Amino acid sequence: MSDAAPPERFVLAVDVGGTKLAAALVDPGGRIVHYDRVATPNPAVPDAGGRDAERLWRTVRALLGKLVADAGDPPLAGVGVGCGGPMTWPAANVSPLNIPAWRAFPLRERLRALYPGLPVRIHNDAVCVAIGEHWRGAGRGRDNVLGMVVSTGVGGGLVLGGRLVNGASGNAGHIGHVVVDPDGPPCACGGRGCLEAVARGPALVAWARERGWRRENPHATGVDLAADARAAQPVAVAAMRRAGRALGVAIASATHLCDLDVVAVGGGLSQTGPLLFDPLAEAFRAHAGLEFARGVDIVAAELGQTAGLVGAAALVLAQDHYWSAG
Amino acid sequence: MSDAAPPERFVLAVDVGGTKLAAALVDPGGRIVHYDRVATPNPAVPDAGGRDAERLWRTVRALLGKLVADAGDPPLAGVGVGCGGPMTWPAANVSPLNIPAWRAFPLRERLRALYPGLPVRIHNDAVCVAIGEHWRGAGRGRDNVLGMVVSTGVGGGLVLGGRLVNGASGNAGHIGHVVVDPDGPPCACGGRGCLEAVARGPALVAWARERGWRRENPHATGVDLAADARAAQPVAVAAMRRAGRALGVAIASATHLCDLDVVAVGGGLSQTGPLLFDPLAEAFRAHAGLEFARGVDIVAAELGQTAGLVGAAALVLAQDHYWSAG
C-alpha cells in the first residue's frame, strides 16, 4: 500500500486526554524515542463561540510542532491518535465526554491539513490502549484479546482473529457497558447496572462514602481509596472487592461470547493488585462455566501510561491488524 | 484456492441434531435443491463399546448416500456440517451434549474418508444457523451480526467485519452464557445467571410450573407454554416476559461489546412473536444506553429450520467469510 511505513520513519503518536495531551515519536518496532506532554486547556464551561476549541487545537499543534522540531525534523510515516469518545469513525469528528470544548471537532481533517500526504488515523483512546497491549504488551502473540482500562471510566478494545474489531460504527470494545447487574445502579450512558456504573473510580468512592469512608475529607479520590485498601481499611477493601466481582462477571460474559485468549486489565484501579484481581478471579470462576472459557488468561496490562501512544502508532505501523477503514 | 466451488457443483450440507439428522444438496446461491432427513438413533445410555456410536455413523452415511443417489450422483464441491457442541475445532472430534453415543467421535475424519479429495468443514450447529442468517437470511448485506437460537438451549454465532468470529478455540458466539443476573439460577455450564439458565425452554417450563402452570400435566413442554402464552394464560405470558427480558439484557451487553448491526433471533421460542419481542425490546432499551447501540436491528430470524443447512453449506460456498481454518 502506498502509505505503508518504510522501516526507518517514525510515527507521530498523540494521546488526547481531559487532563493531559501527550505525544511521541514511535519507531517501527513500537519504541517511544521522543516524548512530550502538556496540560490540556480544558474549561468545564467552554466559550460558546468556539474560542476554547481553537485554543485546545493550537495547544495540540504547538506540542506536536515542538516534539518534531526537538527530534530534528525526521521524516514521518504518519500520524496516529487516541482520543476520548464518542467520535464519528473513521472521520473522527470528536466530542470527548471529558473535553467539553470539542464537540464534533474535525480533528482528523485538521491533522491532515497540518501533515499533508501522510496517513492520519484516529481511534478511541481505550481502543488504542487495547491495541498497544495486543501489539507490544500483555497480549502480544495472541489472536483474541480484550484490553481494558479501569479508571474514571471503564473502556476497552477488542482484537479477534488477530485484527481489531471496529463494529458497525467504530464503537466495538465498550466492555464498560456490559451489564453486570440488571437491577444495579444507573449508568451515565442511560442504562442500568453496566460494569462502568459499578466499577469506575468515582462510583467506588461514592459507594465507600455511603459506608462511612473518609467522611471528613470531601476531596478523597479513587487513588486514596486504593491506597486505603492496600492499608487494609475494611470499607476500601470491600470497594475493591465490589469492583473485582463486577469485572469478573463482565469478563466471563465477554469470554463466553468472544472465546478470548487474553484479557489485559489496565488503568489506575488495576494497580491495586490482588485486592482487585483475587475477587475478580473468584467471580470469573463462578460465572465462566464452559471449559473453553476457563483457559483465558486474565492479566494486568504491561505498558502502563504509554499503551495508548504505542497503540495509536500501531494504527499506522501495523495497519493490517488495526486499521481497516479508509 | 484449489477447493473453491465452481458454480455448477452442489455442496452436501448436514445438520446433526439429537432428534433428527437432516441433509441437503445446496446450490452455489444457497438454495436447497434436495433434502432428506431421518430420526437420530440416540439412546440416552449408549453401549459402552461404541456400537451405538457406529450405528449413528452408519445412519448418517446411509442418509447422505441416499440423498446423493436420489439426486443422480451430481459432482460435489464439498461437505459442510453443523453439529451440536462441544467439539474440538477445526478437527471436529465431536461430543454433542444431546447425543451421548458420540464422545470425541472423529466426524471430520470419517467424512473425509467417505468423500476423499473434497473439503469437509464442520462447525457448531448454532454457529451454522448464524452463518445462514448472515449469508442468506435476516443479516444479509450487513457486516456485524449476532445470530441466536433460543430453544432447548440458547446458542449463537458472531459475524464481525463480515467474517465469522471463531475465537481462540472455535467457541465464539456462546451468547447463551453471557451473564444476565449474577445471582440468578445455576446453569448447566457450572456458572450462574447465564442467559441460557433463565431463557431456555425447559427453564421457562420449570419456572412456570413453580407458579402453578399445567400442574395436572407433567409432560407439558415449551411448545405448550408458548401456545398458552398466545392464549393469554397469565403465568405463560409472564414466562415469555421473563425470557424476553433476559434476552434484552444479553443483547444489550453483546451490542455494547461488539457494536452490532443486526441481531437475528431464531429457534422455537422466537416464534412466540411480540409476547417475547416486546419485553425483549423494553429490556434492551433500558440497558442499551449508548447511542451507537440503539441503532441495532433486533429481528426474527428468517430461514427457519433450514438455516443450519444453509450455513453449513456456506462453510464451503463462502469460505472467505466463514472458514478461516485449515
Image (cartoon, coloured by chain):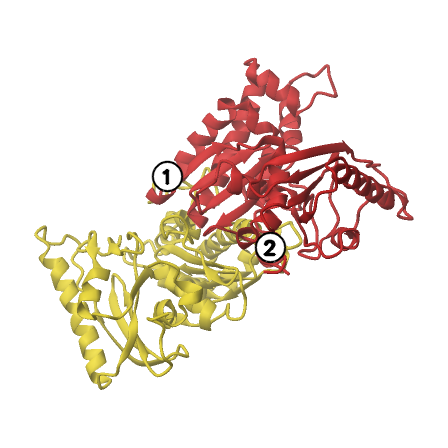
Chain colours: A red, B yellow
Residue under circle 1?
Answer: A294
Above or below, A207 against A126 in this view is above
Above or below, A133 against A274 in this view is below
Q: How many marks?
A: 2
Q: Are marks 1 and 2 on the same chain?
A: yes
Q: Residue A99, labelled with which disc?
A: none
Chain under callout 2: A
Residue that appears at 20% across and 52% down: B103
Amino acid bearing label 2? Ala
Task: Work out whether residue A187 or residue B293 is closer to the camera in this orientation and state it.
Answer: B293
The local secondary structure at tag 2 comes to loop
Residue under circle 2?
Answer: A4
Quarter that holds the N terminus of chain B: bottom left
Above or below, B298 against B47 in this view is below
Q: Nearer the viewer, mark 1 or mark 2?
A: 2
Residue that appears at 33% across and 42% down: A291
Q: From this viewpoint, which residue is outermost toward the bottom?
A: B72
Amino acid bearing label 1? Arg
Q: Would residue A259 appear left or right of B117 to someone viewing this image?
A: right
Give the image location of residue B39, x and y in percent: 21, 69
Give the image location of residue B306, x and y in percent: 36, 72
Disc 1: CA contacts within 10 A as few (<14), some (14-19) or many (>=20): some
Disc 1 from disc 2: Cα separation: 38 Å
| First in sequence: mark 1 vs mark 2 | 2
Above or below, A294 against A242 in this view is below
Residue that appears at 48% across and 27% down: A277
Chain under callout 1: A
